[in-house]
Image: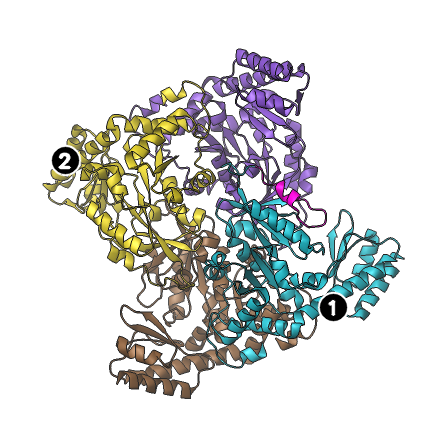
Chain colours: A brown, B yellow, C purple, D cyan
Amino acid sequence: MAEANADAAPAYGTDPWTLAAEERFRAMFGSNAAAYFVFNGTAANILGVSLLLRRYEAIICAETAHLNVDECGAAESLLGSKLLTVRAADGKLTPDLVAQRLGGRRDVHRAQPRVVAISQVTELGTCYRIEELRKLGDFCRANDLFVYMDGARLANAVARLDCSPAELAEHVDVLSFGGTKNGAAAAEAVIVMRPELGADAPYLRKQQLQLASKMRFLSAQFLALLDDALWLRNARHANAMARRLAQAVAEIPGVEVCYPVESNAVFASLDPRHIERLQRDWEFYVWDSGDHTVRWMTSFETTKADVDAFAAAIGAAAG
Amino acid sequence: MAEANADAAPAYGTDPWTLAAEERFRAMFGSNAAAYFVFNGTAANILGVSLLLRRYEAIICAETAHLNVDECGAAESLLGSKLLTVRAADGKLTPDLVAQRLGGRRDVHRAQPRVVAISQVTELGTCYRIEELRKLGDFCRANDLFVYMDGARLANAVARLDCSPAELAEHVDVLSFGGTKNGAAAAEAVIVMRPELGADAPYLRKQQLQLASKMRFLSAQFLALLDDALWLRNARHANAMARRLAQAVAEIPGVEVCYPVESNAVFASLDPRHIERLQRDWEFYVWDSGDHTVRWMTSFETTKADVDAFAAAIGAAAG
Amino acid sequence: MAEANADAAPAYGTDPWTLAAEERFRAMFGSNAAAYFVFNGTAANILGVSLLLRRYEAIICAETAHLNVDECGAAESLLGSKLLTVRAADGKLTPDLVAQRLGGRRDVHRAQPRVVAISQVTELGTCYRIEELRKLGDFCRANDLFVYMDGARLANAVARLDCSPAELAEHVDVLSFGGTKNGAAAAEAVIVMRPELGADAPYLRKQQLQLASKMRFLSAQFLALLDDALWLRNARHANAMARRLAQAVAEIPGVEVCYPVESNAVFASLDPRHIERLQRDWEFYVWDSGDHTVRWMTSFETTKADVDAFAAAIGAAAG
Amino acid sequence: MAEANADAAPAYGTDPWTLAAEERFRAMFGSNAAAYFVFNGTAANILGVSLLLRRYEAIICAETAHLNVDECGAAESLLGSKLLTVRAADGKLTPDLVAQRLGGRRDVHRAQPRVVAISQVTELGTCYRIEELRKLGDFCRANDLFVYMDGARLANAVARLDCSPAELAEHVDVLSFGGTKNGAAAAEAVIVMRPELGADAPYLRKQQLQLASKMRFLSAQFLALLDDALWLRNARHANAMARRLAQAVAEIPGVEVCYPVESNAVFASLDPRHIERLQRDWEFYVWDSGDHTVRWMTSFETTKADVDAFAAAIGAAAG
């Protein structure tokens, strides 16, 4: 970013940093793919689904989806789109779960499902396997549904599956590629996999308050992340730290890990008094106060020492 | 309506029919109540909740609510409002069910619950008792929530409970009073129980495409319905016909009534082959093709002979 | 309507009245045309333009358009659409006036013009000639613009031009056909001239609060109007009464007719004290209090005696 | 920003950088004022007006307002708000111009004017004097209207008027304070002058896609700008460069400066062939191709040498 700041440059995305970053994304996702940079993950989701929906069409998503619970109703308020939520034990949609919400097609009384929105990795830290994505994608194509993938933590999925980003994107129509949770200051990309879906994107990005006049500052963040695979190294490290934490707490009595640890999140349930004690010194979310579940996140900055100290603190609190 | 047609009259609701109909509703719901006439039930719901919601506020309702499933996403599209749905076995909300959706208050990432929307009678034909409405109303007031009541079939509830409309309305802030399902051609009323909630209503009714230039035709329908308690006689008759049907089918093996029959609807499950046979001659909805549930509605026009003939047909189909 | 009331009928527009009325409109506008019935003129305009607009597209219309000034911001609020207004002396758009608002195409900072909305007859009582419609239509087609025509008073244009409705509709993509101002209680039709533009119409009509469960009451109004050309006789009569009024006031000193009287409206300017005196006994709008313009409307119910008495009153007030 | 990057920090605006920047804005605008940081100028405008408008209320603004022409219809699309535009010769609103759009108050057919949106400095480079702001503010208060001030270039107004920011803000309800055009990478602030207007701001900022998880990067930009009055020195310099340019071109025959040069913009009209020649080497906007007006902007980075070289080039092109 310091480099991008050195001199004046053309505005609104015609600068060399932006052209270079766009090219990097084409190299990553295929020559038909186009990248649109925005400021945060909520904006990426809203821009992404807005490319795929008409006024009376709805989004099928998991109850736990960021799009549903963590965007202050932006999909409804800014786009007017209905969300048809599905209870998914591990945060992952399947053809069967999607099929539950397909009743009422061609019934004018019902909002018509058009987009299936998934998160990779999910908000519960689980990761769709390629085979699961393929099945879901095939089902959606056969049922006239688009797939949008919230990739705020796509890097963690790539690290987990040891695949290429393109292999993940093959089964979806539009996705986001997160920068902010992986080292950037504030930068996300919306990747449109087929040109015919992207015609409205430049207008909608502007209308949705995401066009940076000094786009080079967004682009420079991606150049830095994509350079030398920093994004992937960051994600691999974060995933490894979560596994280390999961292993450490597995041996602590009274602490139960809730979901498979497949990225950089560990969900666990423990006695609420132990949670309280732990929160005096450590900052983390209580995910569900009903069943005493907490969420512990690791990042590119988390060290082994951090993990070990935290695990020791859990042991002490729960001991 | 023929009377209202006889001569020209002032437009947009200053005619004598409208003034008289408005007065009739004040007599029914109290001198603080104001009635706004609209064309259909979906419009009544949208106008009603729009009086109570800011841009980032949400509606808690049952999954089965008309507002959720039968309005083609109007609440989301026209108002931008998020619906927080609750699974309610008999279509009725309770304080406990509402409390499930109150997590995340004062968390800026979450749409903020503000309106609890109930239907009286519900879409499953069940009827809130006065005591249930009181408890829900008290809970909502204590939790800074408004109550909106979809009264598309309020008449059936009044008939069922043998109470006054005002007793039902006492525990809510805004409600609708249905005409169309109870004999009118196309007329619903939105009743605003406190003047401070109604200041925006005239503008929002116009903006929401519900201002009739010849309002007298809407008003005349209400005058006819309210005259001599026709609305209540119609509803009592419809309820009685549903009870008659429920009793008749209770004795037919293979037919199971699903919910308490408390208004003019009978839900039953039966063998899908029997449903198919029955639909050759009779028109009704299959409510849920998964569990083979059907919905049979009675109305002010249904005769005892209709019921008996239909019950006989069910017996024959299921026999 | 009394006939439609005689018995129960299928809901939501599959009844025989609706099928017959739809057929009548196809006979009028061509076999590719489809009619969608709604409750009022504002709703017809909103449904009509909503078929033609994406999220970032705008409507070019005259400043005086009903869509702009008399719909409480419904186009903006319900559809999110920007209006690009044009000052048009007589309420009529021309290619030159439209061209004024075409700057900024393909500039992402600008809402993109897509629909040109005209009124026939206009809100100022003027009437586009067929040749004017053809030129405007040709210009719009050449510039990738749709034409929507607000036909709340289309009948008056047909009466004025002595043409067929199809001749007026030939140069537009979607239009409305007004019933309410021409004798109906509350009924307007949206006519979609090409099937590919109408795919969303059934859903959007429902979402926009315009689907009547007892559609037959809307349809019956059109059957009555279209029968025996009642709609056209009504409009011819109203136009004739306006001409009679214009001729009568032409001779009154101090009263100046403002626009060509080409339908059922007479706009005139006169001394504000004379306006005030006249309004004691007669009801009409002061159109513009700045330049003391008033609007006098005639209808199918106006009699020669009404006109003559009113003209006499004007003479007395201005005398 | 490099400093803010050095270590992890609490998310969503509870970090020390944000608290410090918020405090700086309170020091600048008064202890009742609250600052909300967003990513760009369009977002600041949308958040600002959204705090002041109900669903059926409208914004009065100049035709030239950024809000009207340069935001791809965001006010209409995201907020559903109607803009009532006014032709203002120099881009500045006056009580008389505002009064032109106040017809139809309390008429339910009309969107109701509630916010008067002005830009300081305006999009034409002109600057409201304090006395003009006072008169407009008094008029608005007396007429139940809020004032929103787009301060994307507020710094240039402060530099021009040699006043404090608080003196400018005294006559408005909500304003923006621009960072991006004055040296920041991407940072604007919405300043809410009275606490009762800001209750919804945290939710609406999130919903409008403007909540940065790493808010410290936005805040750090403001800390840098506000430190040692860098923002004001930048603006003074930019203004001085525009004056230098205006003086230089005043002597070039065939080039006419269009508006008073009161900030960092010079508008001029010149022969279209001269414009074309000049654009081969220099980048600037043709403001209006109809009357051959161009816009030349200066910034904190513009040097005297830049100005002199550009003026020489104009002279050569026009010579």
Q: Position of residue A153 (x, y in %)?
A: 45, 71
Q: Position of residue C220 (x, y in %)?
A: 39, 25
Report the magenta residues as a range: D86-103
Residue in view at x 67 percent, y 51 percent: D132
Residue in view at x 17 percent, y 42 percent: B261
Q: Which mark is residue D237?
A: 1
Q: Is residue D168 magenta?
A: no
The correct choice, above or below, for D207 with respect to C68 in the image is below
Q: Residues within 10 Å of mark 2 (few under 14, many from 20)?
A: some
Q: Is residue D96 magenta?
A: yes
Q: Which mark is residue B244?
A: 2
C303 or A172: nearer the viewer: C303
Which mark is nearer the camera, 1 or 2? Answer: 1
D288 or D61: nearer the viewer: D61
The correct choice, above or below, for D216 with respect to A65 in the image is below
| Image quadrant where residue A312 sits | bottom left
